Image (cartoon, coloured by chain):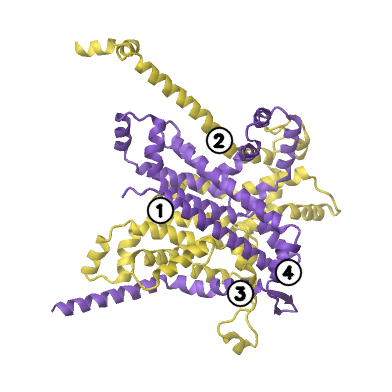
Chain colours: A purple, B yellow
Amino acid sequence: MEKKKKKRLVGLEKRKARAGYLFILPFILGFLLFMLRPFLQSLYMSFTTVELGAGIFNLHWCGYNNYIYAFRVDPEYVRLLTEELLRMVVYSFAIIVFSFFVSLVLNQKFQGRALVRAVFFLPVILSSGVMLGLESNNQLIAQLQQTVETTTSGISITAGLQTILRTTGVGTRAFEKVFEVINNIYDVAMASGIQIIIFLSGLQTIPASMYEAAQIEGCTAWESLWKVTFPMISSLFLVNWVYTVVDFCMRSDNQVIDKISTTMVAKQDYGTASAMTWVYFVVVIAFVGITSLGISKGVYYSD
Amino acid sequence: MINVDIQKDTFWDRNRKSGGYLLRKKATAIAVSICRFILLFGLCFLILQPILNKISVSLMTEEDLFDPVVISIPLHFTLKNYEIAADVMTYKTSFINSLVISLTTSIIQIAMCTLVGYGFARFRFPLKKLWFAFVMLIIVIPPQVISTSLFLRFRFFDIFGIFKLIRGEPLNLRGSIIPYYMMCFGCMGLKDGLYIYMIRQFFRNIPMDMEEAAYVDGCGMFKTFVKIMLPEATPIITSCFLFSFVWQWTDGFYASMFLGGKRLVSTSISTVVDSLGVYIQRLTGEKVAVSIAYSNCILSTGTLMVVGPLIVLYLFAQRKFVESIASSGIKM
């Protein structure tokens, strides 16, 4: 009797496993058909020179030449790659900090809160896909910005602050990055819609009793921010960090991607383009992997 | 009598009784809300300003653009820009094309992603971790990595040489929408990995009891999914659908890769500046250089026309967008 029961359970497990495979079948098929092969093919291409003939293409194995070309010969690639990675680090960090504090503010009770939240989420919808590219190369806005900058030079608050800090001799290089981010706060705000929502949802799950207890124990609001709020939503920092970095490296105004597509389309140099893409891809994945490992060490799980 | 006494107790009396605490608290609250107002107003203005700016520019005539006096309120109010932009972008056809394609692809995508997400959330099967790692992989692979070879694949499309046997040559599927539909069926469309992930997270948070009850009552796996789990998951499905629709609407990458021949709003907006020159040349019969200011005015108008439907959608379905992103991110 006992044995029979166990056997039936195995049967059910088996049926469930089969059903599970049926459910994810579309993904498996799609992955094998449309992702795996192109993925490997582009890896293979990065080790070859691609010759385009009439309606046909030939691949000639050339070893690491494309990679050597990308790093040693191409005048722009290394510079663009390092610049873009540095920009990614700085901006992702800025986006996380910005969205954390904005979500803290939006979590408070005040009039018109729903409206403000809606506005902060608007960029997710409006600055996606082609819209982003349009925004960044809108010449009229660029011109306007230039005129504003030339006519108001010295009046800009950040520039003023910067000169003050520079004359006092406080770490100038670090501040330059900070000011760069502040000057581009628009980009930061436009890229942090989803992150704000995720943080907000996390904030709402923190029980009010915790804050009450902290207050009774004599915590100030500032202390309870770091001792209660921060640990309670620390797992969301990981989610948001990964999302932000990935989102950033896929933006259409990314210079490396731009460089790759000009190599691919204008120069018809598919081999080098694939090599460049792969370098970029591996670097980004490694970066995401290492940083999220680091963050996940610091994450606090309450249960 | 007691009631009257309490009402007589003014703010200052109560403040004195509390030893100044009440006043301090009140003052802090007011100061905080003023600071918050300034901060939020500034940030909201920052986000909305480009849209407002576009609206005002789109209502200006060309002379207003060069008039240094006119900054945001047009002197000569006109709707002509909208007509021109609509003409240049062939707005009607592109709008309908975009609508049809965005709707169909998002329906397919979300249907497939729901199935897959449910499979990942609820069943245990061998190699599950591996497959899920692949889902993660497609989230982080930039589509540019695979674009070349996908392109070549659909240029010379074949399934195990069947078409080559019948027609003597592989199928050329470039320029038609079929490849993209096929990719959507295979969950390889735009941001599908993200939808799978979100839907999986949602299903994981639903307690197991309901399904188990259904199984015990003799309901099959698929029937359980359709009858019991789907109704539960409506919020996440709606919001994924909305996202999918919106992102498809503005997507330029897949559109230009697969749907080269079809005019969509997203592709026509990115070429609107060039088309404007051609359009004016055709109209006047001679080659005219369009001023940067005017072409940007048309660009702004066009952008508004592309984004307009999305803004309307957002106004009506704002809650639906936000609601379930929230629920999916919490538990990793």
Disc 2 crowd rating (10 Å Cα; few below 14, some 14-19, many 20+) is: some
Q: Is A247 or B154 nearer to us in this picture?
A: A247
Q: Are marks 1 and 3 in contact (CB under 8 Å)?
A: no
Which residue is under mark 3?
A41
Could you tell whether B306 is left or right of B234 in the image? right
Which residue is under mark 1?
B328
Letter of the chain that mark 2 sits on in the rendering: B
From the image, state whether disc 1 or disc 3 is nearer to you. 3
From the image, state whether disc 1 or disc 4 is nearer to you. 4
Q: Are marks 2 and 1 in contact (CB under 8 Å)?
A: no
Q: Is A55 or B292 nearer to us in this picture?
A: A55
Whether residue A109 is visible to the viewer of this picture, yes or no, is no
**Element assignment for label 1:** helix
Could you tell whether B169 is left or right of A14 in the image? right
Looking at the rendered structure, the kind of residue marked 3 is Gln
Could you tell whether A259 is left or right of B157 in the image? right
Alpha carbon distance from label 1 to label 4: 42 Å
Alpha carbon distance from label 1 to label 3: 34 Å
Q: What x and y, as percent, mark residue B53?
A: 65, 38
Alpha carbon distance from label 3 to label 4: 15 Å
Q: What x and y, as percent, mark residue B125?
A: 35, 72
Alpha carbon distance from label 2 to label 1: 26 Å
**Element assignment for label 4:** loop
The mark found on residue B43 in the picture is 2
Could you tell whether B104 is left or right of B283 in the image? left
Alpha carbon distance from label 3 to label 2: 46 Å
Looking at the rendered structure, the kind of residue marked 1 is Ser
Q: What x and y, as percent, mark residue B259?
A: 63, 66
The image quadrant of residue A63 is: bottom right
The mark found on residue A269 in the picture is 4
